[in-house]
Image (spheres, helix red, strand yellow):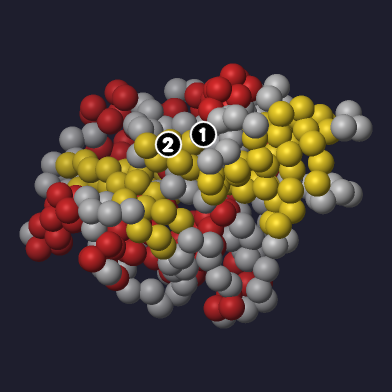
């Protein structure tokens, strides 16, 4: 299975630079997997497609403002994405490679940049919690081609976010307002998957099967598992709000021993995958050749996926994290 089949051309003007306001006024492309019928609507229409017997699974992970900037000893401004707190005040980071392997930085508190085993780390003199609170920026996607700002602190966060840990937002959840959640009479439950490198790093292998996903942490409690199992037993539909919710519950379906504890998943969903816990999916429109587009194609079918993307392009839907959405029924 070759990566090139997941290519499509997207005009730059269709990349959503900011979210539409209010959130629940985003456009919605509705597609039926069995019939192939495609309709156009709005996110506010979502409650019309489900009953109180159906179950929606949301990802309640919270994005941290983990982009920080600092000047090195040569007064050159550098930007860092804090990926993981590995120990005490030592964080694994992503940054453009400096010329030196060890540099001191002034980041309102002192920090030192080190390279170990081909990875970059920042070691802070003290806990960077206050630094992030006062100066941290949201890690918005690079394809937005702009600086993160104060508006992103609210925009790049779901209204139900509660568990700190993500370096990217579960973007399907960004469409929900508190009013829409109240009007959505479907049964609801929450899992946590901390979005990490595995979700957004590009596929570099020409053959999709050669790609290896980075691990991401997730937590699903036993009560949620029982709700999912009851829904399946009673032939009620399970709606995953976003690909991260889907990956979490499908990882649990593969190994139910992962319940009630923090677990890791590097599940890469490709065509032919056996979906056990997901019947419907709400998702944004994803980058060409991405693991997320491959996942959508696996769930909906390649031909129908490409048809939907063609319609979205023709109808000038807004794409990517701050863009419009697709509901797969």
Q: Tell me, for residue 86, which label it has, or none.
A: none
Q: Is residue 43 left or right of residue 69?
A: left
Camera-nearest residue between 34 and 302: 302
Q: Is residue 317 visible?
A: no
Taking depth in this image into account, of 239 and 131 the one nearest to the observer is 131
- Residue 307 falls left or right of residue 5: left
Asked if residue 266 is positioned above or below residue 272 in the image, the reply reads above
Quadrant for the C terminus in the image? bottom left
Q: CA distance from mark 1 to mark 2?
A: 7 Å
Q: Position of residue 85 (x, y in %)?
A: 54, 44
Q: Give the answer, above or below, for where 252 lies relative to 15.
A: below
Q: What residue is shown with label 1?
A: 64
For label 2, count other residues whose C-alpha is less than 10 Å away and answer few (under 14), some (14-19) or many (20+).
few
Q: Which residue is mark 2?
A: 164
Mark with earlier residue (1, 2) = 1
Q: Which residue occupies 32% across, 43% down?
A: 58
**Closer to us: 195 or 282:** 195
Residue 70: give x, y in percent of width and height: 76, 30
User: Is residue 61 at all visible to an observer of this figure?
Assistant: yes
């Amino acid at each position: 299975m070759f990566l090139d089949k997941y290519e499509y051309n997207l005009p730059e003007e269709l990349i959503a630079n900011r979210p539409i306001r209010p959130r629940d006024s985003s456009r919605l492309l509705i597609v039926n997997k069995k019939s192939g019928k495609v309709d156009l609507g709005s996110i506010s229409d979502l409650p019309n497609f489900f009953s109180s017997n159906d179950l929606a699974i949301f990802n309640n992970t919270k994005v941290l403002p983990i982009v920080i900037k600092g000047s090195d000893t040569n007064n050159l401004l550098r930007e860092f994405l804090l990926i993981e707190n590995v120990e005490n005040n030592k964080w694994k980071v992503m940054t453009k490679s400096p010329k030196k392997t060890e540099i001191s930085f002034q980041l309102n508190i002192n920090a030192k940049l080190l390279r170990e085993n081909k990875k970059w780390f920042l070691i802070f003199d003290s806990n960077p919690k206050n630094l992030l609170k006062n100066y941290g920026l949201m890690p918005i996607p690079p394809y937005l081609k702009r600086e993160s700002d104060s508006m992103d602190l609210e925009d790049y966060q779901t209204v139900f976010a509660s568990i700190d840990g993500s370096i990217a937002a579960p973007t399907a959840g960004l469409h929900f307002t508190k009013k829409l959640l109240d009007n959505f009479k479907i049964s609801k439950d929450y899992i946590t998957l901390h979005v990490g490198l595995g979700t957004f790093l590009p596929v570099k292998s020409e053959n999709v099967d050669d790609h290896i996903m980075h691990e991401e942490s997730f937590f699903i409690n036993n009560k949620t598992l029982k709700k999912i199992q009851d829904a399946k037993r009673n032939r009620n539909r399970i709606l995953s709000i976003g690909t991260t919710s889907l990956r979490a519950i499908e990882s649990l379906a593969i190994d139910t021993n992962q319940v009630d504890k923090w677990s890791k998943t590097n599940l890469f969903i490709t065509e032919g995958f056996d979906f056990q816990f997901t019947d419907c999916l709400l998702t944004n429109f994803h980058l060409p050749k991405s693991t997320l587009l491959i996942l959508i194609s696996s769930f909906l079918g390649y031909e129908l996926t490409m048809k939907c993307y063609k319609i979205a392009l023709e109808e000038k839907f807004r794409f990517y994290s701050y863009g419009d959405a697709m509901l797969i029924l």
